[in-house]
Image (cartoon, rainbow, N blue to C red):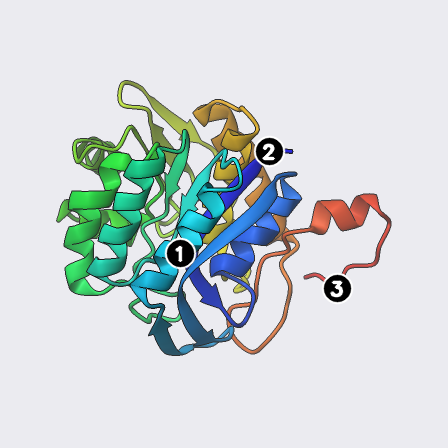
Amino acid sequence: MRTALTIAGSDSGGGAGIQADLKAFAAQGVYGMSVITAVTAQNTQEVRSVQNIDPSIIQDQIEAVFDDIQVDAVKIGMLSSPETVELVARKLQKYSPKNIVLDPVMVSKGGHHLLQADAISALMKKMISLATIVTPNIPEAEVLTGSKIHTEEDRMDACIAIQALGVKSVLLKGGHLNGEPNDLFYDGTDFHWIQGERIHTKNTHGTGCTLSSAIAANLAKGASLLEAIQISKQYITTAIRHSLDLGHGHGPTNHFFELYEKANLLVNHK
């Protein structure tokens, strides 16, 4: 069985972070493993507190996985501190996994900053160049490029600027812009528009984590970058369409809707 490793923070509400990553891995048919970089106390409404994991424990988790199990893809999410960024980058350089999907998690759905200001610089200098693909949303891309993004031309310019940081390819997500949430994939040479569908629901907690994890899972299974993105875009669209109306804030997507539907199980979805 193909495998994928997520290196990210834990979400006690289960909708994002490590929890979403492992669900997406399972839904896409790969064996999921995890390295927890931070523990967050959060629900559908807020992030109440964050506790960064000691770097020595993060290191031990990474080494424990790589020293024993074949890792076909790595998804990187919340790293929080510059020390964590530098440690993870150093270990990935050592183990050199074939596929690395970097989701530059900076702010939670509720507006809580999950990446320290000085960690952004470390991410750009130490981590991006190691990634196979980076998957920023519009606000994250604006931080990475230092430019506002409004038009299609802005988005293309942003992809070029981010790719110039050393990453092999860029998927710039379009959900924060008006209109249909079309994503732009830049492979370093050509642009590809990935068509989306605007689904009117507040239950979108963990969409970025889920999409990037699905991409990692499909890369682990041998798909090309474009194929992995297309499959994952369809998967997250279905998960949002049948999102779960849990809690009083932004509910989670439905990671297993297609599996439950095939099994003829009743699903409490919206």
| Picture mark count | 3
The residue drawn where x is 25% and y is 44% is 90
Residue topped by disc 1:
60
Q: Secondary structure at mark 2?
A: loop
Relative to residue 267, is residue 11 drawn left or right? Answer: left
Q: Is residue 168 visible?
A: yes
Q: Give how far across and how far down residue 256 sits, in percent.
A: 69, 51
Residue topped by disc 2:
2
Q: Amino acid at mark 3?
A: Asn
Q: Quadrant of the N terminus?
A: top right
Q: Is 115 drawn above or below residue 26 in the view shown? A: below
Numbered tag placed on residue 95 in the rendering: none
Chain-order first, disc 1 or disc 3: 1
Relative to residue 176, is residue 115 drawn left or right? Answer: left
Q: Secondary structure at mark 1?
A: helix
Along the viewing direction, whichever of 49 and 86 lies nearer the viewer: 86
Using the numbered discs, state the Cα–Cα distance from disc 1 to disc 3 in whole angstroms: 39 Å
Chain-order first, disc 1 or disc 2: 2
* Residue ranking furthest to the right: 264
Q: Amino acid at mark 2?
A: Arg
Q: Quadrant of the C terminus?
A: bottom right
Quarter residue 236 falls in:
top right
Numbered tag placed on residue 268 in the rendering: 3
